[in-house]
Image (cartoon, rainbow, N blue to C red):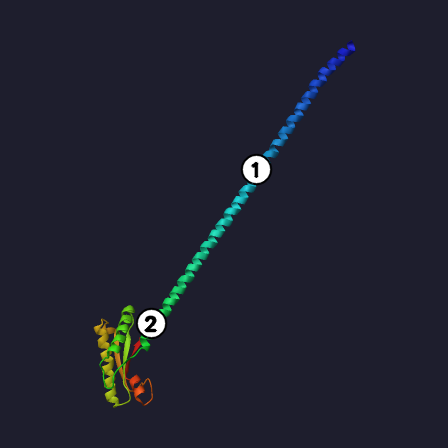
Amino acid sequence: MRKNSWMCLALLLVIPTLLFNISCSCGKKTVISEPSLIQGADDEAARLDAENAQKEALAKEAELARRRAIEEQRLQEQLAEEEAAGRKIMAARSLFEKEDIHFEFDKSTLMPSEQEILRRKAQWLRNNTDAKVIIEGHCDERGTNEYNLALGDRRSESAKAFLVDLGIATSRLTTVSYGEERPLDPAHNEEAWAKNRRASFIVE
């Protein structure tokens, strides 16, 4: 009987101790696992943030590259337009200088066809207000040097007067006569003489 009492007392002491140990063990496991879950969530959030930052950086880089490409294309188009405009200006100037007007034998009056050429030249001069022009009067080889110099002068002055009547300032036009000294065609026939009876235009 006494023995049974001791056993009951022992069990009463041991069982609460075991229950306490088990409770403590479970509590420790819970405490240990919670930081692990939090750390995992933080790592995932950090990974997502890094991915988003990388995507934003790549998007910005792509946008900058796109803008650079657009600007480069714009500059190339602008350069091409400027070059085309420059070629057009040079072509117009070249035509202005190459297109002579011609006269009948021993005449300084302007034929209708030559007046039309002078109208085109006047338009070019209006578009190029800084340009000044030398008008050269020429003759064929027939006649004396003195006579041809005077005839060449009358031809250059006739062209100048027509341009002035079209609104071109006198100060922009200079005349000179070379008479028969500078033939365009050195041959001694009517075809060559027709070419040499002219006024030519040099842009200063």
Q: Which comes sooner in the sequence, label 1 or label 2?
A: 1
Residue carrying label 1: 42
Q: Residue 8: horizontal and vertical position, in percent?
A: 74, 13
Q: Is any part of residue 158 visible from this angle?
A: yes
Residue pushed farthest top? 1
Q: How many other residues sit within 10 Å of disc 1, few (<14), some (14-19) or many (≥20)? A: few
Q: Is residue 110 above or below residue 13?
A: below
For the N terminus, the quadrant is top right
Instruction: Classify residue 105 as left or right of residue 6.
Output: left
Q: In this view, does 169 lie above or below 196?
A: above
Q: How many other residues sit within 10 Å of disc 2, few (<14), some (14-19) or many (≥20)? A: some
Secondary structure beneath label 2: helix
- Residue type at mark 2: give it: Ala
Of the numbered discs in the image, which one, if any, rests on residue 89? none
- Residue type at mark 1: give it: Asp
Rendering quarter of residue 143: bottom left
Rendering quarter of residue 34: top right
Of the numbered discs in the image, which one, if any, rests on residue 92? 2
Q: Residue 118: horizontal and vertical position, in percent?
A: 26, 75
Give the camera-side residue of 79 and 193. 193
Q: Residue 75: horizontal and vertical position, in percent?
A: 42, 60
Give the camera-side residue of 179 and 1. 179
Secondary structure beneath label 1: helix
Residue shown at 69% from the left, 18% from the top: 16
Could you tell me how far apart the alpha carbons at marks 1 and 2 are, in whole angstroms? 74 Å
For the C terminus, the quadrant is bottom left
Q: Residue 119: horizontal and vertical position, in percent?
A: 26, 73
